[in-house]
Image (tube, rainbow, N blue to C red):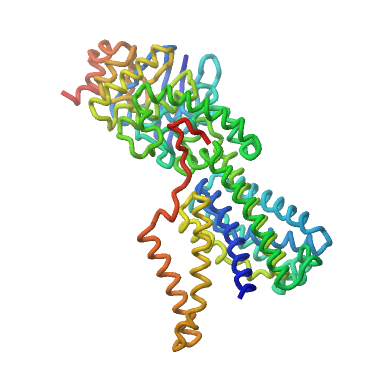
Amino acid sequence: MLKISDLTKKFGAFQALNVGQIDIPRGQVTGIVGPNGAGKTTLFNTVGGAFRPDTGQVMLDGTDITGLPPHKLAEQGLVRTFQISRDLGALTILENLLLARPGQLGESITASLFSRARIRAEEENAVEQARTLLERVDLWRLADQSAANLSGGQKKLLEVLRAMMLSPKVILLDEPAAGVAPTMEGVLADFILSLKAEGVTFAIVEHDMEMIERLCDSVYVMTEGREMMHGSFHEVTSDPRVLEAYLGSMV
Amino acid sequence: MIGYLTAILIFVIISALIGLALNLQWGQAGMVNFGIFGFFAVAAYVAALSAMAGVPALVAALLAVIATVILSALVALVSARLREDYLAIATLAFAEAVRLFLLNETWLTGGANGLPGIPRPLSGVASGLHYELMFLGISVVVLALCFVFAQLLTVSPFGRVLRALREDDLVASTLGKTTLSFRVRAFAAGGAIIGAAGSLHSFYFSYIDPTQFGAFVTAYAFMAVIAGGRGSNTGLLIGAVSVMVLLEGTRFLKDLMPFLDAGQAASLRLILIGVGLILLLIYRPQGFMREYRLQAKDGDVS
């Protein structure tokens, strides 16, 4: 589904990213782990349009999406979430979701002035779509509250829900479990798995190994900007090189 | 007294219009426009020069609106990559460029002498106080139209994207929004309202010169938006009225306290305005009204 090849990114003289080949297969959850500074978030930033890569190629479902800006990536079906939740606190929870819906007539000034009835109908459909998503994670009861009032875990859920409004092919999740209470971690994991069951593809950067074990079909290990190995969770965690580079420090 | 009140109300309406524009640009979209007085000046001069060239008032006002819309869009476009304080400086520089142009291109603008004798619309219909009242009526209509315009944008998905951009433009673009397009359009929409404000100003005073378009215009607009509650159009109206009450009301200090000489009264007036603002910021930092939020849980979408 998502194929990353020979992707490099330098900051000054520092080679932040030097990836050979990473494949995120359709309908699976692929984990990306590695010690701090291994380039995981840089990888997401480069694939997700925040940075342009120096060289290399990113293919989404057969389409070249290398170096596209974030809003173009969203059109192509690739959405990311952020390590530190970026809720839009001036918007309600429902508005956060409605915002993400693509192709809204009401985003045009002339339509806002002269096509009120059509916008109203469109908004009602959008609210229905958002309501279905919010009800799945029991957030509909908070729909009209400011997104700033949510807990850490709920904000992470909100980011995933917001992404889902775009009906994306691939969602990049940057540390979904960071800053999330243990009980919410379970809710979040269950929700991600239920979306996977519906055919959404995920790539996840995460430090929480329980989360990785629970969610991921396969795992890439990154160190120093490159992918070191790829395998199932158990293959990866029992590999001595990985233990040395990453897990060794945890013993 | 009625004449004075009419004049004050027209001032309030003009400053409320500028405030409405700023509320769209900065209040909602988060684009700091310190140069709002420059756009206001352009509108006033375009309306004045067109009217003096014999163009009907309505067409002159339309030309002023077109001019400010185009200029606003251009300024937003060239400063596309600037945010917050940098945009503030860029817009201030634009306003300064406008001021220097008005002062120096004497052949067109009359320079420091300004433009006297701008024909007032419908001046054959009424005269004296009746004319003033009629002009007030026209101003109220213009304000109502601009308010509806701004409010329709605020409650639409367009306004929702603007608030999202203000909060976090990376999130908005990650969710597929073309940030540049929304910024340019928000700035231009604000420009349209400034165009209306500048036209009213020219027609009401029938004389304009560069000193009428100083940084104080921007300051009052920001005061009105902050007092009213950033992002709220209704709050803006209350804010604009409060600022004007504070500014004008303090003029009567001298009558209340005859023991003050003119200089002391003027200084006390400025102190009171400052104190009023500080009190507002301490006790009501969020302003009089909260900005619009969709409340749709009970199925009411509008």
Q: Nearer the viewer, residue B299 or B148?
A: B299
Residue B142 image position (x, y, % from top left): 66, 55
Please say if B179 is above or below B58.
above
Residue A186 vertical placement versus B283 (above, below): above
- Residue shown at the point (74%, 67%) measured from the top left: B109
User: Can residue B63 be seen here?
Assistant: yes
- Residue drawn at x 54%, y 25% is A75
Give how far across and how far down residue A251 sits, in percent: 15, 23
Q: Position of residue B5 (x, y in %)?
A: 60, 70
Toward which corner of the image does residue B38 lie, by quadrant? bottom right
| Residue that lies at the very extreme toward the right in this rendered image | B54
Examine the rendered structure and indicate whether residue A209 appears above or below residue B279: above
Image position of B10 (left or right of A174) = right
Q: Quadrant of the N terminus of chain B?
A: bottom right
Q: Nearer the viewer, residue A201 or B231?
A: B231
How far from the left and from the top, in percent, is residue A38? 33, 28
Image-quadrant location for residue A121: top right
Q: Residue furthest left?
A: A251
User: Relative to A149, is B187 above or below?
Assistant: below
